Structures are given as structure tokens and as C-alpha cells.
Amino acid sequence: MSEQSANPKPNMPWKVKLFIGAFSWVFDSSFRHDGSINRRLLNFFDYKVPPDGVASSDTTVDPSRNLWFRLYNPTPTPTGGDPNDVVGLPVIVFFHGGGFVGGQANSILIHNAVHQLARELHAIVVSVNYRLAPEHRFPCQYEDGFDALRFIDEMDGRDLPANADLSRCFLAGESAGGNLAHHVALRAGEYSFKRVNLLGLIAVQPFFGGEERVESEIRFPRGPILRLDLTDWFWRAFLPDGSDRDHPAANVFGPNAGEISDARFPAAIVIIGGCDPLRDWDMRYYEGLKRSGKEVYLVDYPNAIHGFWSMGVMPEYCLFLEEVKEFMQKQMGK
């Protein structure tokens, strides 16, 4: 796995710069100073797309909390054939980003990114739609993530594609979803699944933090994409009332965190960006896993901004796919 030094000057295509401007305006207009959110405005610009036939379908886990997932099956449908004829695809349970407050599994950006991920990695991807803050605070998102994984474990052959190999299962998440995936992995280590066998954790620029201002936050207080004032807002919206950013949900190896050396935890790959304000927190996460005796790999892209992979146009995207493929193949080959 490649490890490279940070570069403070990202080289971004004009389309990415245009997207960042629009994205920032919507976020700035949606998040209020009093800690509430203009959900109607955010949803207006968050265009939703339906599942697209054989490639994807939606499954409800718990309608009372709008917990559901979108499943992507990359196997093409031959003329007159059945897409389930091909067996043995690994399963990736994916959690989207959005600071725990934005995004849904059927949001167009998330749908398109996950659709491409399933196709390029040739894996079945289960994209979980979990509850959002500030309407639903910690630990709702972690409960939803684990309950979705347990639901998948209990699905029978009529509901789960026959080509889904749950013995080769991975958790994955981007930004807040990477944080969520970490906590779901910890809880999964204490649970006896019937069919799910977790082989790995794919953490893409995971959203961690703490009271301390680390160097990457000081160097990149205004993004691109992710700003320091936004990360603070996200933590206030997500964490329990009265908590600070050293809460163990945010600062997983901080002063209030528990010891995980003896915890059952899958191998992990941590992907970070040199121009991401979260970079140093992600480095601490990698170092914390390593210090705890876990199998962990680091991939550091010096020019990558926060959220580079979901845009699909940054030069690092193809490298990202190859790194994840290599990691998955290594874990599946053990």
C-alpha cells in the first residue's frame, strides 16, 4: 500500500470546482446557527433516483425508522438468463457520508458513486439508509448500521441474490460512513452471525475528530468541500447534548475511548487525502489501530481533497479502485 506526504495545493478540474461551489452554498443555506437544519431546502437540492431494474433494488429493514438499503448487483443479465446464475461475489455493506446529517442511499451522488463502485469492484454492494441528525442523534446511526448488517445475515435465499457470498463480507464507509463502519465493526466483533463473515473494513477519509486542533485542520480550515466550522456543526448535531468532540464516538483513540486491543476486529484499509482537513485525524486512526495490534493498511493521496472518490473525476480515483481491489483480494485469499 502506498504512503505519500501531504500537498497543500490540490489540482482540481473545473467541473469539481463548480460542484464544490454549489455544494457549499446548499450546505451553508441549510445548517442553522441554532443547531437545527433546514431539511426541506437540503432535500430540494438532494435529487433522489429510483433503483434501476436488475442492477439495484430496495429492501426495507424497519419502516418505523426509515431504515432500508439499496442493493447493487453488478452481474449483467444475459438474454433469457438469470443474473443469479453467477455465484460467489463478495458483499460490501456501505455507509454513505454527509456528517451524519445529510445524504440518503437514493441521493443521486451517492447512488451513482455506489453503482460505479459495485461495477468496478465486481462486488454486491448494500448501501444502507440510516437515520440522520440532528433529528436522530448518537447512537441511532450506529444502531441502524448494526441492525442492517444483522438483517442481511438473517435474509434467506429468496430475498438475497444467490450470487451473494456472505462468507466474504466487507464493511465500507466514506467520511461519516467510515466512522459508522468502524463502530459497527466493533459491535459486530461481539456478535455471532449465522452467515456473515467480516473480512475487512474499508474506511475512506473517515470522519473522526477531537477537541484538539490538529495541523490539517489548521492548514485547511475552509476545505475544499469540508470546512472546519462545518465539522464542528456536524459534531454538535450528532453527539449527545453536553458532549464535546472527545466523546469516544468522535475521538476513537482519545482520552475517553476504550481499549480495543482484545476486540475482534477485521483487517482495515484507511484511505486519506493530503488536502483533507480530516487527514491528521485519519492518520491517528490508522496509528491507533496499528498500536492496538490490528491488521491495517494506509493509502495516502497527497493531492486528494475530501470526498474525491465520490466525484469519480480526480486522478486518484483509479488508484483508489486498485488499492481497494488489492486489499479485498488479499483478505479473501487468506
Image: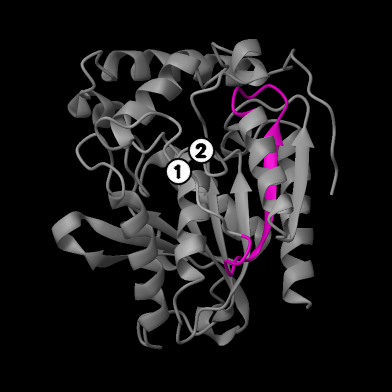
Q: Position of residue 292 (x, y in %)?
A: 68, 56
Left or right relative to 214: residue 230: left
In the image, the segment drawn in magenta is 261-279
Q: Quadrant of residue 260?
A: bottom right
What amino acid is labelled 1 in the image? Pro
Q: Residue at x 33, y 66 (%)?
A: 147
Horizontal arrangement in the rendering, residue 153 relative to residue 331 (left or right): left
Residue 330 in view: yes
Q: Reply yes or no: does residue 264 show up in magenta.
A: yes
| Residue that carries the numbered disc 1 in the rendered image | 248
**Circles 1, 2 touching at the beta carbon (< 8 Å):** yes
- Asked where in the image residue 301 lies, by quadrant, the reply is top right
| Residue marked by disc 2 | 251
Q: Residues within 10 Å of mark 2 (few under 14, many from 20)?
A: many
User: How far apart are the alpha carbons under marks 1 and 2?
Assistant: 5 Å
Considering the numbered disc 1 on the image, is that residue within a helix, a strand or a loop?
loop
- Does residue 80 appear in this view? no
Whole-percent x, y for residue 130 in the image: 32, 51
- Please name the residue shown 83% across and 27% down the image: 5
Q: Is residue 9 magenta?
A: no
- Foreground of the two, 4 or 162: 4
